[in-house]
Image (cartoon, helix red, strand yellow):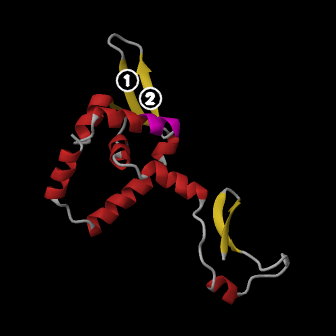
Amino acid sequence: MLRFVLYSGLCSAEPEMAGNDMAAKPTVSMMLSTSTTQICPRYEHAISILGKRWTGLLLDALMDGPKRFCELTALVEGLSDRVLSDRLRELETEDVVKRVVYPQIPVRVEYQLTEKGRALKPVIDAIHAWAEEWVTPSSSSHEEELQQNH
């Protein structure tokens, strides 16, 4: 059985030893016969953030630079103002997006990626590459999604 431990800031798996013999080294057969029992908490949290509907599209839109709320609404077709507001607030809480208020009349607000958010660029690029190779766009499913969100 594998148990996950936090080691040097990364999640890793180590074989669970039978009994109290902590000095025993795991054998190859022990390692091969193990099974995963728990997901790394960091990975799980990352997926809970990034896996929410619309989040990937928002991050992709913000990769090109700061955007105003109305620009994001226009770029991410079918996204309601309420959901956009929720996603931006969640990403701001996670320090992935920064809300910048310009004190002018009228007040101007922009959303931009933080360093943590910009660090997701290779992930977003990899998803683009994967989608180009493996995903066939379906216009009917996109239209159905839009109708469900209104």
Q: Is residue 111 above or below residue 131?
A: above
The answer to whether the residue labelled 2 contacts the one labelled 1, judged by CB atoms less than 8 Å apart, is: yes
Q: In this view, does 144 lie above or below 16?
A: above
Residue 120 seen in render: no
Task: Please give the label number shown on residue 99.
Answer: 2
| Residue stretch in magenta | 89-94
Q: Where is residue 60 in the image (x, y as percent from the top left)?
A: 35, 47
Q: Where is residue 116 in the image (x, y as percent from the top left)?
A: 52, 44
Q: Looking at the rendering, which quadrant does residue 43 occupy?
A: bottom right
Q: Residue at x 47, y 44 (%)?
A: 117
> Which residue is at the far top?
105
Q: In this view, does 79 lie to the left or right of 95?
A: left
Residue 69 seen in render: yes
Name the one closer to the observer, 94 or 33. Answer: 33
Q: Which residue is drawn at 53% across and 56% down?
A: 44
Q: Where is residue 22 in the image (x, y as percent from the top left)?
A: 83, 75
Q: Position of residue 45 (x, y in %)?
A: 54, 52
Q: Is residue 31 left or right of residue 108?
A: right
Structural distance between the alpha carbons of marks 2 and 1? 7 Å
Q: Is residue 62 above or below residue 105?
A: below
Q: Which residue is drawn at 85% across and 78% down?
A: 21
User: Which amino acid type is shown beneath numbered disc 2?
Assistant: Arg
User: Which amino acid type is shown beneath numbered disc 1?
Assistant: Val
* The C terminus - image quarter: top left
Name the one closer to the observer, 63 or 81. Answer: 81
Q: Mark 1 points at which residue?
A: 109
Q: Which callout, 2 or 1, points at the residue further toward the start of the chain?
A: 2
Task: Please give the label number shown on residue 68.
Answer: none
Q: Secondary structure under badge 2?
A: strand
* The N terminus - image quarter: bottom right
Q: Looking at the rendering, which quadrant does residue 8 occupy?
A: bottom right
Q: Does the magenta stretch include residue 68?
A: no
